Image (tube, helix red, strand yellow):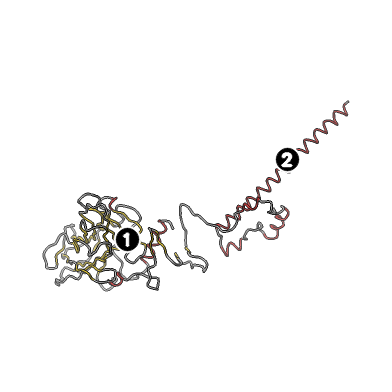
Amino acid sequence: MNKHNLFLLSVCLTFSYYGWAQNNFLDTSTWGLSTGSAPGFNRLGSDAENVREMGVDPFGNSSVLWKAVPDAQNNGDGGWDSNYIEIDPTKNYRFTVWIKKTNSNDGVTLFGFYALDPSEARSSYNLDGTAQTNPYFLWGDLPQLDQWYLLVGYAYHENHTETVNQGGIYDVNGIKVSSLNDFRFYNSTKWLVHRNYLYYNTNTNDQQFFWNPTVYEVNGQEPSLQDLIQAPSNGSGNAIWSETNSVASYDGKVQVGNTQVPSDYMMAVSGKLIAEEVKVQLSGDWPDYVFTEEYTLPTLEAVRMHIQEKGHLPNMPSAKEVAKNGVELGEMNKLLLEKIEELTLYILKQDKALQHQSYINQSLEKRLAKVERFLKE
């Protein structure tokens, strides 16, 4: 399966598991396999430091990941600021993202947001009521390298009075392994910006991966944290997709659209497919057998009678059969080549007959010329 098709399938699988009444304010379906910014996500650092590629998500499935690839400069090394999200400052909001860091703890992992008033001035508080214009739920390191963690932070409404932080870092088993800082809005807050970074990392062997960022209003219609941590499965508790040496695989049938997968097929698509190249592997003989001495070429009379009786060429499916069963590309190409090779033999036989007739005509012309000379003498 090529990357383009593999990218489209992973999006369908990722976003079809859940049916909550509330939509995520962040749309990661825009994460095409590319570098730099994506629609709705404005890169931090250079294009080369922001790579979107197929990889293994926290549940072992093949998904599009945002990868931060630091250069040797001591500055921003990947990640994003989201577009402005208009919100109601009398409501509470929850921010999440899955992050994994590899190789070393150099640099800083940052998970936070901006709150902005109508004039785009920063407008957020710490929970104790002191102003905080640069709010980060996390500024530091993840608990362990090479492990996925769900980071959760809350921004509360303007009149929130509790000072206990509810946010935290959760492992893939749903265990809260660390607490994070929460914040609250000004009464004038109008917009949010979701932001995730790798910063101040000069180790070019490091990488940081982001997956499935979300912003939800906390109103009872948002997915629970258990929903976000629970692995989508095929009904048996096993991950649907797996990856080995950058090759994603799935042990089962695939249905795209509303076309049912026939029992003897592995995939069905309701709609059109596009690819730069399609290769069909065939079993059985290729039609070179037409050119062997053992092959019996039908006579043209036999072909004519078959067409009159059946309405199509010998050894070819009828229009009714095609309408009922479709066309198998490999087999049809084989049959078409068989007919082309038969036509070639008919042409060669006709050419041979024409050459023989031409020889006879030339002989007759010579004999006739002799007779004419004899009569004149």
Q: Residue at x 34, y 53 (%)?
A: 34
Image location (x, y in percent) of residue 226? 29, 72
Nearer the observer, 99 or 375: 99
Reply above or below: 289 against 326: above
- Image check: 134 left or right of 101? left
The amino acid type of the residue labelled 2 equals: Gln
Nearer the observer, 156 or 64: 64
Give the number of the disc on residue 28. Answer: 1
The amino acid type of the residue labelled 1 equals: Thr
Q: Residues within 10 Å of mark 2 (few under 14, many from 20)?
A: few
For the N terminus, the image quarter is bottom left
- Image check: 200 left or right of 309? left
Q: Quadrant of residue 321?
A: bottom right
- Image check: 226 left or right of 187? right
Q: Residue at x 66, y 57 (%)?
A: 314
Discs 2, 1 touching: Cβ within 8 Å: no
Reply above or below: 360 against 320: above
Q: Disc 2 and disc 1: Cα gap in Å?
A: 71 Å
Q: In this rendering, which labeled residue sits more in front, label 2 or label 1?
A: 2
Image location (x, y in percent) of residue 290? 65, 52
Image location (x, y in percent) of residue 309? 70, 60
Image location (x, y in percent) of residue 160? 16, 71
For the C terminus, the image quarter is top right
Q: Quadrant of residue 12?
A: bottom left
Residue to which mark 2 is pinned: 355
Q: Earlier in the sequence, mark 2 or mark 1?
A: 1
| Numbered disc 1: secondary structure | helix
| Numbered disc 2: secondary structure | helix
